[in-house]
Amino acid sequence: MRTLIGAVAAMLMISTAAAFAGQTEGLIKKVDKDSLTLTLDDGKSYKLNAETDLDALKPGMDIVIAFDVTNGENVVTDMELPDSSAN
């Protein structure tokens, strides 16, 4: 019985964590280096980490973002930029 309760609790924690994760794509509208945020053309903002190469992010670029919602903020966990060698 104890094992069953532990397994159910673990599944609840996993499903709760997944509910706060997301993925989106769009065009970069603005990069704010002071607040480390990225705004897409849909108006939503995403918090970047300090190690992000901000110079590589330019308005008008296509981007795919994976993010978590932490304390009400969309925090980028991974991103994919267009392949510049595809030309």
Image (cartoon, helix red, strand yellow):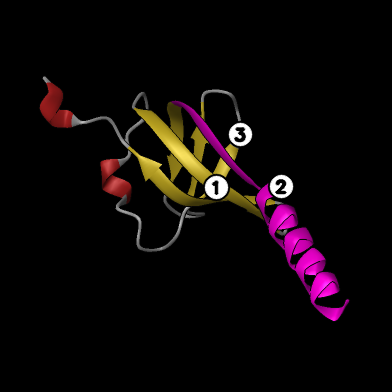
Residue flagged by tag 2: what amino acid is it? Ala
Number of the label disc, if any, that sits on residue 19: 2
Q: Which residue is mark 3?
A: 44
Q: CA distance from mark 1 to mark 3?
A: 12 Å
Is the residue 70 above or below the residue 41 in the image?
below
Which residues are drawn in magenta?
1-26
> Foreground residue, 21 or 14?
14
**Image position, residue 58 (x, y; %):** 32, 34
Q: Quadrant of residue 43?
A: top right
Q: Nearer the viewer, mark 2 or mark 3?
A: 2
N-terminal of the pair, mark 2 or mark 1, is 2
- Residue behind mark 1: 67
Q: Residues within 10 Å of mark 1 (few under 14, many from 20)?
A: many
Q: Is residue 39 magenta?
A: no
**Where is the C terminus found, in terms of image quarters?**
top left
Direction front: furthest residue:
1
> As drawn, which residue projects farthest toward the right?
1
Name which residue lies at 43% across and 40% down: 31
Which one is earlier in the sequence, the residue at label 2 or at label 3?
2
- Secondary structure mostly seen in magenta is helix
* The image quarter in which residue 13 lies: bottom right
Q: Amino acid at mark 1?
A: Phe
Q: Residue at x 50, y 50 (%)?
A: 76
In the rendering, which numbered label is found on residue 51?
A: none
